[in-house]
Image (tube, rainbow, N blue to C red):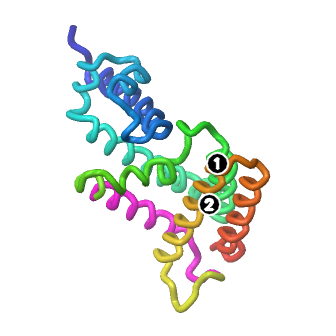
Amino acid sequence: MRYSAEHKKRTQAKVIAAAGQVFRKEGYGGAGIDALTKAAGVTNGAFYGHFRSKSEAFRIVVLAGLEEVRLGISALKAEQPQGWLKKFVNYYLGYKRTCSLGESCALPSLSGDVMRADDKTRGAYTEELEYLIAEIAAGLPEDTPIDREGASRDDRAILLLALLTGGATLARAVSDPALSAKIAGLVETEALHWESREA
């Protein structure tokens, strides 16, 4: 039986979403092909019909995760130009910090495995991260309280991403809910230095 291009596209999206959850929960090394295919509800043959290898599936999952963050920020900026940053930071340090690991942001949950990935994956990650940095930078004001020694908006976008990603990672890793909330609160306060001068 031949499937339509639309059916194949929907199936691939389903496989990417399921693989994304498995890679986030288990890490690259812990996510075997059997676990990936089981989560997606497809056979090994169907999986390899979409991806040549596990590493290609991981690369696509990482890129989809970073694109999701970028498109989410773009939508927030369009909906709420004056308050997008506060809404994003609250969401990132609220829901995205406390949701199941499989639903977490790709930056804290997958970047560690990207560091150990092949050059093609790291190159693709770098390119997508640069798009994300540009998207954030375009929504920041010309000058902000963190504008030390003439830091560019791109520099400030990198600082913001590093702060949020590192903060979410620490807050999720600790076993004490009170400490997790404290970390998130401190990071939120620092991150929202931008919000007070947002354009």
* Residue in the picture at 40% in, 60% down: 129
Q: Residues within 10 Å of mark 2 (few under 14, many from 20)?
A: many
Report if the CB atoms under discs 2 and 1 are less than 8 Å apart: no
* Residue in the picture at 40% in, 17% down: 41
Is residue 124 one of those drawn in magenta?
yes
Quadrant containing the N terminus in the rendered view = top left
Give me the C-alpha separation between circle 2 and circle 1: 9 Å
Residue 52, above or below 169:
above
Quickly name the residue at label 2.
167
Residue 28, above or below 94:
above
Which numbered tag is attached to residue 97?
Answer: 1
Magenta range: 123-144
Give 79 or 99, whichever is nearer the viewer.
Answer: 99
Q: Main secondary structure of the magenta part?
A: helix
User: In what element is the residue under mark 2?
Assistant: helix
* Residue in the picture at 66% in, 54% down: 171
User: The residue under label 1 is which amino acid type?
Assistant: Arg
- Percent position of residue 59, x then y: 31, 45
| Picture quadrant where residue 18 is located | top left
| Picture quadrant where residue 51 is located | top left
* Residue in the picture at 50% in, 51% down: 69
- Percent position of residue 136, x then y: 51, 65
User: The residue under label 2 is which amino acid type?
Assistant: Gly
